[in-house]
Amino acid sequence: MSGHSKWANIKHKKGKADAARGKVFTKIGREIAIAVREGGADPSSNGKLRDVIAKAKTNNMPNDNISRSIKKAAGEMGNITYEEILYEGYAAGGLAVIVECVTDNRNRTASDIRHYFDKFGGNLGATGSVGWMFERKGLAVVDRKPGMDEDAMMMMALEAGASDMQALEDAFEVYTEVQDFSAVREALEGRGCTFLSAELTRVPQNLTAIDDPETLEKIGKLLDALDDMEDVQNVYHNGDLPEEEEEDD
């Protein structure tokens, strides 16, 4: 699950990717399809496609799979129509949740998401009901290799056009405005940075602390159920949850 920006969350998300690689590749393939439809199959002239390819590589998607996905997207756009849909609601305990989907069947996706919110003590809200609690940002998580200096990394990130950077024990979180994300990512890549994750994200403006075990159990089940849906690309929440809820298996 994706929550507020903590490396623990990203590790959890990556761990799930390793455990269900095929499903993750399918989701990325859908992102490639959307990018190709919007800007064509040539990454050199399609910034969004370049960003998705970078994301695919951070998820260990082989180059052959990426190429096949691009060719498939370019060849099947007339037969398969994917659309991006955003769902907003509250989990148990008043936790704000945003679900980003790419689907070829809006009715199926809406029905499944509503079912899970209802089943695990939440409620699906109207468009805009929780979106205002989050800021859309670019986030590139750079592997903090031995000897990497925090001040030097900060300077490099700012020179590349980033808006902020947070240093963690094993990574640097580099934040950008949405319109600057591609340029910053490519600049850092050119400087030799290795990304553990690189994509647009939603950062909550404030966090909701939850420690009731029963509520946490319901939240965990909802987030896991949503993550497991093939139509769901990303799940964001504003929870300040105990570390065990975000552990990397």
Image (cartoon, grey):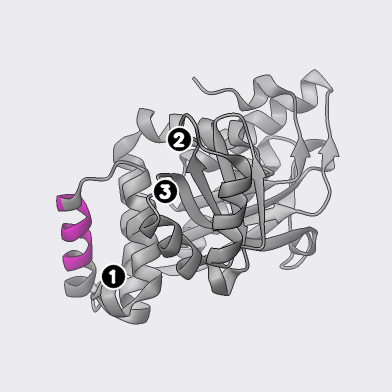
Residue 203 belongs to magenta span: no
Q: Please state which of residues 30 and 40 is positioned toward the viewer in this rendering.
A: 40
Residue 69 belongs to magenta span: yes
What label does residue 14 carry, if any?
2
Provide the residue span drawn in magenta: 64-71
Q: Residue at x 50, y 58 (%)?
A: 101
* Secondary structure predominantly adopted by residues drawn in magenta: helix
Q: Residue at x 36, y 43 (%)?
A: 59
Q: Position of residue 216 (x, y in %)?
A: 74, 26
Q: Is residue 182 above or below residue 242?
A: below
The span from disc 3 to disc 1 (Cα, nearest Å) is 36 Å
How packed mark 1 is, by other alpha carbons closer than 10 Å (few <14, some 14-19, many 20 or more), is few
Say if mark 1 contacts mark 2, CB within 8 Å. no
Q: Nearer the viewer, mark 1 or mark 2?
A: 2
Q: Is residue 103 above or below residue 9?
A: below
Which comes before the other along the chain, label 3 or label 1?
1
Q: Hey, what amino acid is under mark 1?
A: Ile
Say if mark 2 contacts mark 3, CB within 8 Å. no
Res 1 visible: no
How packed mark 2 is, by other alpha carbons closer than 10 Å (few <14, some 14-19, many 20 or more), is many
Q: Position of residue 74 (x, y in %)?
A: 21, 74
Q: Relative to 248, is 90 on the left or the right?
A: right
Q: Please state which of residues 235 and 192 is positioned toward the viewer in this rendering.
A: 192
Q: Hey, what amino acid is under mark 2?
A: Lys
Q: Which residue is mark 1?
A: 80
* SS state under label 3: loop
